[in-house]
Image: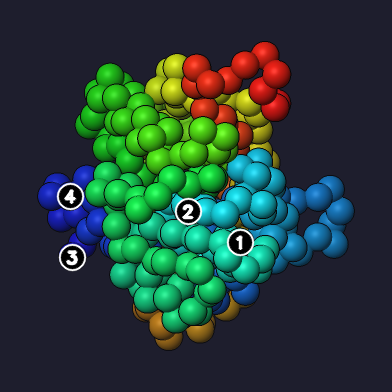
């Protein structure tokens, strides 16, 4: 299926996600780090920092923000190729870990790891029904796929609010959540790249920080917000450099046209983050509940 068909028929559905993520793992392995983490890394200021270390550091940040290392049960919404799940599984025995993905390839790959305590579901958050409450929820890079470009702002906010309400229902009273998403920065919605919206991520629309805050109000307290757009500029630049360096290998795997398309996408995205047109939000959240008191832990 081509991108135009996915846009016309599916919106932010499984088919649209699979259009991008099921291109072929062999292709992504050429330019991602060894953990196949396909989201913004967390860099230090040192020039000798590596992509793999930066991705591990990012995963550690989310585990800490959600207090997931000590949690007995964790939900990963948009688990990708399992970098976070693998690190959570290594935190200790007895942990129940559930990963959701809409990518057939990602689900098969993570299941093949046979991570202790991990259950991988080819399932949308809209269809998820947990067997028991979670102590922590982490979602990295999923929210940016929920809305479509033709959705009204009101519909977007309602969708995000539905997401937050479901997550609050799934969490134990003391549970925490950590969220990461690309968001609009200085760029207006109507200025979004047609190339990205049609050739790379069919029918996806980014949130704004304001929309997220409005959607979470009364459901979650946002305790910390990071805008790490420069970290994503550096991450995309590293991916672009890797792909250029292995251009011939990529062509052998997916062909010249797709390789060139991704080189353009990675470079254009790096520039967009550098200029501030788009941002990278990482948020730590806790439940808003009558059970909270003035002595509640921060």
Q: Which mark is residue 10?
A: 4
Q: Nearer the viewer, mark 1 or mark 4?
A: 1
* Tag 4 near tag 3, CB within 8 Å: no
- Residue position marked by numbered label 2 in the rendering: 76
Above or below, 218 against 36 in this view is above
Instruction: Answer whether labels 2 and 1 touch (C-beta < 8 Å).
Output: yes
Determine crowd level at label 3: few under 14, some 14-19, many 20+ residues with C-alpha closer than 10 A. Answer: few
Kindly check if marks 3 and 2 are in contact, taking CB atoms under 8 A apart as contact.
no
Please indicate, yes or no, whether residue 1 appears anywhere in the rendered image.
Answer: yes
Badge 4: residue crowd in 10 Å (few <14, some 14–19, many ≥20): some
Q: Is residue 285 left or right of residue 77?
A: right
Badge 2 element: strand
Q: Earlier in the sequence, mark 2 or mark 1?
A: 2
- Location of residue 6 (image quadrant): bottom left
Label located before the other in sequence (3 or 2) = 3
- What is the C-alpha distance between the residues marked 3 and 2? 28 Å
Nearer the observer, 230 or 227: 227
- Look at the image and tell me whether residue 51 can be seen: no
* Residue at image coords 18%, 65%: 1
């Amino acid at each position: 299926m081509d991108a135009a068909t996915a846009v016309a028929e599916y919106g932010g559905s499984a088919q649209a996600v699979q259009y991008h993520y099921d291109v072929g793992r062999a292709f992504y392995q050429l330019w991602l780090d060894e953990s196949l983490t396909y989201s913004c890394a967390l860099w230090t200021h040192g020039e000798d920092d590596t992509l793999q270390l930066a991705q591990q550091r990012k995963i550690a940040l989310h585990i800490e923000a959600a207090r997931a290392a000590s949690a007995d049960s964790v939900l990963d919404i948009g688990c990708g190729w399992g970098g976070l799940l693998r690190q959570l599984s290594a935190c200790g025995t007895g942990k129940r870990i559930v990963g959701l993905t809409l990518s057939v390839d990602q689900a098969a790959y993570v299941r093949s790891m046979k991570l202790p305590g991990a259950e991988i579901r080819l399932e949308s958050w809209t269809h998820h029904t947990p067997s028991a409450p979670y102590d922590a929820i982490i979602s990295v890079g999923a929210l940016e796929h929920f809305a479509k470009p033709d959705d009204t702002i009101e519909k977007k906010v309602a969708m995000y609010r539905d997401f937050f309400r479901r997550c609050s229902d799934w969490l134990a009273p003391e549970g925490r959540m950590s969220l990461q998403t690309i968001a609009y920065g200085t760029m207006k919605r109507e200025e979004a790249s047609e190339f990205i919206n049609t050739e790379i991520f069919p029918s996806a629309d980014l949130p704004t920080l304001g929309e997220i805050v409005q959607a979470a109000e009364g459901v979650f307290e946002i305790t910390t917000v990071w805008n790490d757009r420069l970290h994503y500029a550096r991450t995309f630049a590293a991916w672009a450099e890797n792909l250029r360096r292995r251009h011939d290998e990529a062509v052998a795997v997916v062909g010249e046209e797709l390789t060139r398309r991704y080189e353009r996408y990675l470079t254009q995205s790096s520039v967009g983050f550098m200029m501030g047109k788009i941002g990278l939000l990482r948020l730590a959240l806790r439940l808003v509940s009558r059970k909270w008191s003035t002595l509640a832990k921060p």
